[in-house]
Image (tube, rainbow, N blue to C red):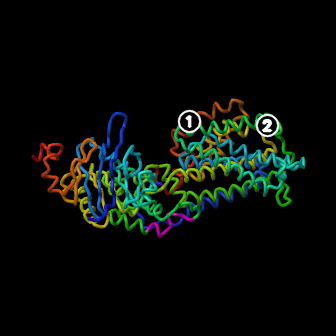
Amino acid sequence: MTAPLLSVRGLRKRFGGLVATDGVDLDVVEGEVHALIGPNGAGKTTLITQLFGELTHDEGTIRLSGEEIGALKTPQRVARGLARTFQINQLLPDFSMLDNVALAVQAHAGHSFRFFADARRDEGLRSRARQHLAAAGLSHRAETKVADLSHGEQKQLEFAIALACEPRLLLLDEPMAGLGHAESEQMVAMLSALKGRVTMLLVEHDMDAVFKLADRISVLVYGRVIATGTAEEIRDNPEVRTAYLGEGDA
Amino acid sequence: MSDNTIERAAPAPLAIGTLLATLLLAAALIALPFAVQALGQPALVPLASRVLIYAIAAASLNLALGFGGMVSFGHAAFFGVGGYVVGILYQSYAGDEPFLGLIPGTDQLLITLPAAILVAGLLALVIGALSLRTSGVQFIMITLAFAQMLFFLFVSLKVYGGDDGMTIRRRNALFGLNTRDDATFYFICLAVAALVFLLFWRIVRSRFGLVLAGIRQNERRMAAIGIAPYRYKLAAFVISGMGAGLAGALMANYMRFVSPDMLHWTKSGELMIMVILGGVGTLLGPLLGAAALMTLETVLTSWTEHWQLVLGPVLLLVVLFTQGGLNGLLARLRPGRSAR
């Protein structure tokens, strides 16, 4: 097995008396889709948020390709190859779709202390951004203001923006949440198309999607990883069945 | 803009209408001194100069407040300090006594304006670096507090007139022009204002401007694409302070007088009213706002000294009903735009 791209050891986070992340160990291997599942309140989003540096952890280490990134701020982690999508969309509502993606391309291209040239006429940025929109199937809505988009389109835009950061590791926080059936399938198709090219840590409740996409699955319960393995191993793991899959599938 | 139904592949070239309107505005501003002379109202020229100066200050505040989402309630600090730079340099020049024993005084506009911009910029760097660690209401209060500190500092500085301020016997000199002449001074203000608005027009469309607008809309999103908001906000705040300092330097020249009044928090409020009246986060809004407020003040004070009794309701109506200040009102009156 190759050295893991992301390696988390003993990660702990407390909110007062509540231990949200309780000594999490997690490895994500280069190239895989690693799903993170668990019941509501297990601390999945809290974990993603700590990996991304928006929330500082209390203890433990986070390594990206062996480099400790636990002390870095979010923009520095992005510069080292992390990107995330948000469960609750975080977009620029007054800007068009194209602007939203072009800004990510611009941020990836270096600093933005450029005061004179019209950034919306910068063909380098714009054409790159259009490619990312096209890949997400959003070309026809490129000039539409984000505030006027449907929820599903906003989710897809989240995804396009994250890809425009050209990440080595993409953290996906419930990309299917709130999507209709057709939109969900479209999202699964996009993720499958990306599989192998970008390493992904996928938090998702939609089990069909998880079993379809994931190479490996980790199960998080009460802030702890209780099992990691392939889809079959997880399905057959008795501990997981009682803790999580329990009722329905038993 | 709300023309979302039209899907464009590439950004449209600068609309002919916008270009025409800009040229028309420029022509009107250039013709103004001659026009009011012909109409026998030469007293309007100084008023127009004041409008231009306040427009520069309001546009600068608008860069931080409207485009960057940083509600500064302390921009009088930069405005006033810009004025004091002119006053102190003039005093040193007239008394032939270098400032702090080091910096020789001057009455040259080409030196005093850049000096005012520089000093205001440094001040904005210090105030901004500390204030921008907060946001929201705290940011409003801390910028206000800094400005009030400076106000009281200058009140207590007896060397520079304290409460009474200092008189500048003659306006700064520029290329042997008669800057005392109202029309000449108006054209100087117009040239400076044109430069400032041109600069801001470029800035808000640049990579920097888009990042700034992005930070205003959603800081978390900007961090997630790898942009550390603090330094961009600070840069915008400094540029904004520099513009306000420039306006203050022109104002000191205009009045031939500086006093702590220029630093008072009510001056910050006035600038804010101009921005809101004209249209927050719009390019020409501050000019419209400054013109509207100055005109209202001039007209209403001739009726009553309690003119702000009328100003209040007017501001209220504009905020409640224009959706984007006077600029928004104008945009909707423009032919060819569907009303919404």
Is B276 placed above or below A8 here? Answer: above
Marks 2 and 1 close (CB-CB < 8 Å): no
Which secondary structure lies at badge 1?
helix
Indicate left or right for A233 with B273 as reference. left
Q: Is residue B243 visible?
A: yes
Mark 2 belongs to which amino acid? Leu
Where residue B11 appears, as percent x and y from the top left, is 47, 65
Graded by Cα atoms within 10 Å as few (under 14), some (14 to 19) or many (20 or more), the crowding at tag 2 reads few
Q: Is residue B277 visible?
A: no
Task: Report the magenta residues as a range.
Answer: A117-126
Where residue A29 appears, as percent x and y from the top left, is 29, 61
Q: Residue at x 41, y 48 (%)?
A: A54
Which secondary structure lies at badge 2?
loop
Marks 2 and 1 belong to one chain: yes
Which residue does the numbered mark 1 point to in the structure image?
B316
Q: Chain of mark 1?
A: B
Tell me the CA gap for discs 2 and 1: 38 Å
Which residue does the numbered mark 2 point to in the structure image?
B157
Graded by Cα atoms within 10 Å as few (under 14), some (14 to 19) or many (20 or more), the crowding at tag 1 reads few
Is B289 placed above or below A126 here? Answer: above
Where residue A245 appears, as percent x and y from the top left, is 16, 46
Mark 1 belongs to which amino acid? Leu
Which quadrant of the figure has residue B255?
Answer: top right
Q: Chain of mark 2?
A: B
Q: Residue at x 28, y 55 (%)?
A: A202
Which quadrant of the figure has residue B309?
Answer: top right
